[in-house]
Image (cartoon, grey):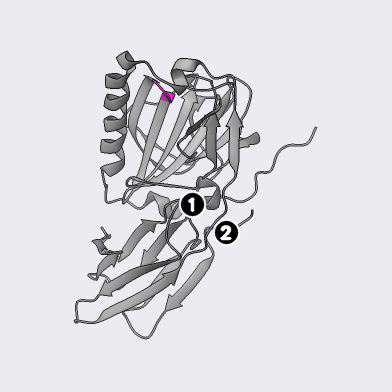
Amino acid sequence: MRIASFLAVLFVFSADLSALELKGPLVQGGLIIGTAKPGSVITFEGTRLKSLSNGTFVFGLSRNAPPTIMLKVHTQDGQIQKHLLKVKQRIYKTQRIKGLPRRKVTPAVRDFDRIKRERDLLINVRNSISLRNNFREGFIWPVKGRISGVYGSQRILNGKPRSPHLGVDIAAPLGTTVLASAKGTVSLVHQGMFFAGKTIFIDHGLGVGTIYIHLSKILVDKGQKVNQGQLIGLVGKTGRATGSHLHWGLSWNLIRLDPSLLVGSMRLKQD
């Protein structure tokens, strides 16, 4: 399913300086970039959003976002704008994967503490909100290859139902170069998570981040600033994987989004 380009303007409310502009697909898994009158207070489903001095803010729509959501803008001159937005609902596929190591599907008791520590680490990284706007410069595919797993699909691993897949898997040969999909700062480097293997997380600002997992090699350091298209690692099959591929994920705070909505169709070189 091809959904409208990430940069397409959805709508603009413009009567005066309190104009509200939203860009991005109003669909489950979508990332929305908004602009309001500077100094406005914006709430999304009752939660106040962080915004930049120029009025830029973002919010994300989860895999199971409801058909309608409420966005409110409280301007400095006392106006309150209420916008009830319709969210396109998606139908998700079921993906069955066999051949995974049994322990990676049903971890042993001795693995529980490690898994919890790594989960908590990722929660802390995703919850860290920096006041930068690198996300406005757009995103690219971090690697070219065959799409082997899509966002939102229900996973059946070795015959056992597991959590939905909240990213995009791109199959590519071992050692294929992985590029930063957008400008940002590396906020996490991990050499071997139980499920994710070698992992990189890049912070793009206001809670927007991308993750690159199952790598064979990491070529950046924590705290390093990277540009879009910069080499950051190599494709691998570390962690829970049956073959070499990159899992590319997008998140807004703890809400996991669909990174494929940020980019156009992948163009592969023809032999």
Residue 188, position in %: x, y? 33, 30
Residue 15, position in %: x, y? 37, 86
Which residue sits at x=35%, y=53%? 133
Which residue sits at x=50%, y=70%? 10
Question: In screen coordinates, is 270 left or right of 97?
Answer: right
Q: Which residue is mark 1?
A: 138
Residue 254, position in %: x, y? 33, 45
Height in image: 25 above or below 117?
below
Secondary element at image label 2: loop
Q: Which residue is mark 2?
A: 5
Q: 112 or 57: which is nearer to us?
A: 112
The answer to whether mark 2 and mark 1 are in CB contact below 8 A is no
Q: Main secondary structure of the magenta part?
A: loop
Height in image: 101 above or below 72?
above
- Callout 1 amino acid: Gly
Disc 2 crowd, CA 10 A, few/some/many (<14, 14-19, 20+): some
Q: 226 or 71: which is nearer to us?
A: 71
**In the rendered structure, which disc, 2 or 1, sits on the residue that comes first in sequence?**
2
Corner quadrant of residue 47: bottom left
Residue 127, position in %: x, y? 27, 43
Query: In the current view of this chain or complex, which residue is farthest to the right?
Result: 271
- Callout 2 amino acid: Ser
Magenta stretch in the rendered image:
194-198
Secondary element at image label 1: loop
Image quarter (top left, top right, bottom left or bottom right) of the C terminus: top right
Question: In screen coordinates, is 269 left or right of 67?
Answer: right
